[in-house]
Amino acid sequence: MALKRLFWELEKHLKSSSGASVVAIDNKIEQAMDLVKSHLMYAVREEVEVLKEQIKELNERNTQLEQENNLLKTLASPEQMAQFQALVQTGDSPTGTSQPLVPVPTGSTQPPPSTQNSGPSA
């Protein structure tokens, strides 16, 4: 009997304060959502800064590689460029090969094209 009365009083209390408790719960939910939003915005801003830095570094690396590529193109002989173009057209990867693009005869050393002499080698 006492238990029944306790439930009845609890039910009466919940019904009478349900309007106020719903508003309080809604306010707590709104505060929690605002907190989550601010944490997410902070995390996103940090990630954006990291990505901007990575983009900057990648752009610098790309510029460096383009300059290196242009230098290598100017130093390559026409035969090497033709062989490279043939490799590119067939889909073969010219990187990672252990053989030179233009075979060099064994027993002789060949200086870079910009320093070659037109006379016989020693």
Image (cartoon, grey):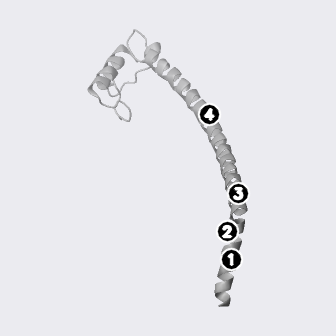
Inter-mark Cα distance, 3 to 2: 14 Å
| Residue ID at (33%, 16%) | 79
Inter-mark Cα distance, 4 to 1: 58 Å
Q: Nearer the viewer, residue 121 or 100?
A: 100
Contact flag, marks 2 and 4 (Cβ < 8 Å) = no
The residue singled out by tag 4 in the image is: 52
Question: Label 4's element?
Answer: helix
| Residue ID at (73%, 61%) | 20
Please tell me which of labels 3 and 1 falls first in the chain: 1
- Circle 2 packing at 10 Å, graded few (<14), some (14-19), many (20+), is few
Badge 4 amino acid: Lys
Label ID, residue 15: 2
Badge 2 amino acid: Lys
Can you tell which quarter of the image residue 2 is in? bottom right
Question: Label 3's element?
Answer: helix
| Residue ID at (68%, 54%) | 32
